[in-house]
């Protein structure tokens, strides 16, 4: 009996450890939310907002890797977002490339551009890096607006629907499951990266780049890798957004769009993958809810941001996790964190 009880106790501890790990329990919780959310989505408009949440969250997960873990500020990720959408749209509409192939080609092209631009840019730090990435976004926006023969100019261009092996992906409900599955895959990949040796190296760079290089960590190489990966996440979300809406304009590459993405990451919590998802969800849904205030919508939105960051200075998810941890008994060494959301 004692052996059976000990085995059961060990199994319980193992199950709790599995459930508290971000890569397992956290991913499973997100999958449950995605699976159950349609129960609360009453119409196509609600599905449309949910799809926007998922697509914004994909960008924020990649951007959080760059800002929260690598400690590199980017104000030009809207440019990568727009290039992913325009690249896939141009290949599909003007050159007849199948959409299921144009999306990965556009993402690969954005990855190459991020690699070429990132090598000299990531040598900068702080506000100089932010200005350099801002300049990149401005250049992309200007090119997309002026090359009207290719991109349609300021008016934008029509984008063909996504088709997989002759089957057109249409309708909000189908797009909801596609965007939700893509978000789940992006979160799973990000969590795997964070728990890998490369993720530990990124955290070391964020803590102290000098100390990390003393230990033999190649800071330039790791920062470049995560910069390229975050750009691919943005390009993938941009391509899916373009094919979902059926239209794309240079506004997708605007400075304000880049700022919105950074605000989502900071609002949800830097260095927290699930914080990036929460930030994207809240700041995508909140403007829709505030339309009842009409002329005072932006004023109320700003007040909400100021109030939230005053009470949640590290972002929503990390602050809630810290509050919860303080209320719990001190855990023995080796026990996982309270929430499976803050790796």
Image: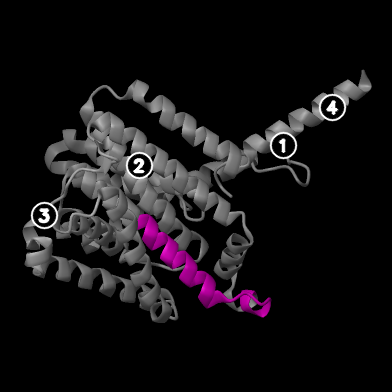
Identify the residue at image location x=39%, y=78%. 121
Observer-nearest of 28 and 331:
28
Q: Earlier in the sequence, mark 2 or mark 3?
A: 2
Observer-nearest of 185 and 291:
185
Comparing marks 3 and 1, which lies closer to the viewer?
Answer: 3
Identify the residue at image location x=59%, y=50%. 343
In this figure, which residue is indicated by the disc labeled 1?
A: 329
Extreme-right residue of the structure: 2
* Distance in Å between CA atoms under marks 3 and 4: 63 Å
Q: Earlier in the sequence, mark 1 or mark 4?
A: 4
Crowding at mark 1 (Cα within 10 Å: few <14, some 14-19, many 20+): few
Comparing marks 1 and 2, which lies closer to the viewer?
Answer: 2
* Distance in Å between CA atoms under marks 2 and 4: 41 Å
* Distance in Å between CA atoms under marks 3 and 1: 58 Å
In this figure, which residue is indicated by the disc labeled 4?
A: 7
Residue 134 lies, with reference to residue 343, above or below; the image says below
Comparing marks 3 and 4, which lies closer to the viewer?
Answer: 3
């Amino acid at each position: 009996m004692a052996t059976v009880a000990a085995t059961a106790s060990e199994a319980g501890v193992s199950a709790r450890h599995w459930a508290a790990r971000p890569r397992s329990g956290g991913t499973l919780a997100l999958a449950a939310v995605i699976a159950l959310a349609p129960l609360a989505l009453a119409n196509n408009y609600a599905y449309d907002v949910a799809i926007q949440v998922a697509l914004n969250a994909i960008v924020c997960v990649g951007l959080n890797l760059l800002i929260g873990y690598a400690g590199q500020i980017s104000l030009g990720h809207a440019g990568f977002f727009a290039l992913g959408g325009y690249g896939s749209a141009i290949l599909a509409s003007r050159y007849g490339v199948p959409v299921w192939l144009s999306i990965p080609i556009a993402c690969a092209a954005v990855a190459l551009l991020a690699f070429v631009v990132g090598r000299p840019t990531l040598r900068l730090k702080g506000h100089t890096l932010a200005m350099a990435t801002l300049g990149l976004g401005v250049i992309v926006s200007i090119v997309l607006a002026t090359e009207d023969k290719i991109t349609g100019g300021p008016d934008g261009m029509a984008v063909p629907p996504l088709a997989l092996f002759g089957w057109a992906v249409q309708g909000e409900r189908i797009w909801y499951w596609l965007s939700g599955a893509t978000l789940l895959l992006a979160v799973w990949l990000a969590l795997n990266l964070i728990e890998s040796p490369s993720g530990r190296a990124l955290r070391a760079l964020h803590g102290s780049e000098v100390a990390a290089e003393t230990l033999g960590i190649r800071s330039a190489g790791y920062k470049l890798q995560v910069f390229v990966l975050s750009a691919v996440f943005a390009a993938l979300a941009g391509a899916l957004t373009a094919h979902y809406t059926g239209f794309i304009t240079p506004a997708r590459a605007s400075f304000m769009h880049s700022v919105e993405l950074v605000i989502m990451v900071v609002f949800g919590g830097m260095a927290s993958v699930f914080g990036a998802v929460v930030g994207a969800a809240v700041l995508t849904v909140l403007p829709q809810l505030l339309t009842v205030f009409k002329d005072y919508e932006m004023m109320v939105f700003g007040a909400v941001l100021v109030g939230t960051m005053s009470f949640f200075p590290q972002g929503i998810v990390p602050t809630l996790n810290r509050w919860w941890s303080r209320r719990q008994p001190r855990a023995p060494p080796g026990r996982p964190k309270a929430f499976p959301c803050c790796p």
